[in-house]
Image (cartoon, grey):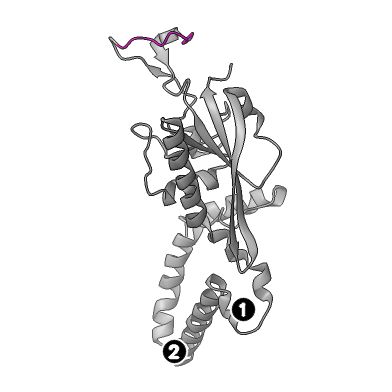
Amino acid sequence: MWFGLPVFAFYLLLSINKSAAPNWDGLAFFGFGLLAIYFWWKRVEASVSLQLCAGVALLIGLVMSVIALNTDLLRTAGYELWRGDQTDRMRGWKSATGAVEKLRNDLEAKLGEKLFLIADARDRASEISFYLRDKRPEGPGHPPVYIVESQDLVNQFSFWPRYDEFVELKPGTPRPEDEVYTEENGINPFVGRNALFIRQGEKGHAPHNIRSAFQSVEPVATIEVQRYGRPIRKWQVFLCRDYRTLPL
């Protein structure tokens, strides 16, 4: 109970003042699940009616889960409920990431240099990182895909190595001619490099922190994944040339 109750109570109070996400209190249900097993185990063993109810509950839960995770069952049965399929949020990541990876490989062959990847949000950066066949991290601890640089600590990506960070220059390594940062012998290894920026939807231009950090930013592709004729994922990809660190 004490593994689950504090987490559940905290997010219950927080959700009074802010719209809650359904996974916020998910951690609490591990403890609650163990508590439920402890509470019901001997009671179910001693009662035939409770055993019947438990069996029916498990069967209903299994059927609901199969339908929820595969609403094509409803579609093939002739229903139109699949049009509002919320599980579309789980679909299309692998196909879209494959298109991004192919685009990256084509551009690298054309430009003759390696490109690093930036996404507009943590969920896109995480999913693309997972489905990349050639993850190619830029260094130890680096994620395969970064999020847009920011001075704010917004999520876990803020604590991992970032492309806007300075690292200590190793002894004997010559400093680049155009590098002006000299404090604590720091250097940014991404300066002067090109990147691909991936964003959700199709809008007019890239965000300010991308346009200001690169000498030029141009859209190069729009990736769209469809399911039964409906778009479920649409990304716009920009080629960002010649990175330079933003002023503090």
Which residue is at a point 37% across and 45% down the rendered structure image?
134
**Mark 1 residue element:** helix
Disc 1 residue type (three-letter) = Arg
Classify 10 Å Cα crowding around label 1: few (below 14), some (14-19), many (20 and above). Answer: few
> Of the numbered discs in the image, which one, if any, rests on residue 104?
none
Question: Which of the two residues, 195 or 71, is positioned nearer the viewer here?
Answer: 195
Question: Which of the two residues, 191 or 104, is positioned nearer the viewer here?
Answer: 104
Question: Which of the two residues, 192 or 57, is positioned nearer the viewer here?
Answer: 192
Is 42 on the left-hand or right-hand side of 65?
left
Which residue is at a point 41% across and 14% down the rendered structure image?
186
When the figure is inspected, residue 65 is found, relative to residue 109, above or below; the finding is: below
Disc 2 residue type (three-letter) = Ser
Image coordinates for residue 207, horizontal then vertical, percent: 65, 33
> Of the numbered discs in the image, which one, if any, rests on residue 75?
1
Q: Which residue is mark 2?
A: 47
The quarter of the picture where residue 230 lies is bottom right
When the figure is inspected, residue 29 is found, relative to residue 156, above or below; the finding is: below
Q: For the magenta stretch, what is the residue range?
A: 173-180
Instruction: Tell me, yes or no, whether the highlighted magenta stretch contains residue 184.
Output: no
Image coordinates for residue 44, horizontal then vertical, percent: 43, 83
Which residue is at a point 46% across and 31% down the rendered structure image?
111
The quarter of the picture where residue 136 lies is top left
- Secondary structure that dominates the magenta span: loop
Q: CA distance from mark 1 to mark 2?
A: 40 Å
Image coordinates for residue 219, horizontal then vertical, percent: 62, 37
When the figure is inspected, residue 50 is found, relative to residue 192, above or below; the finding is: below
**Mark 2 residue element:** loop
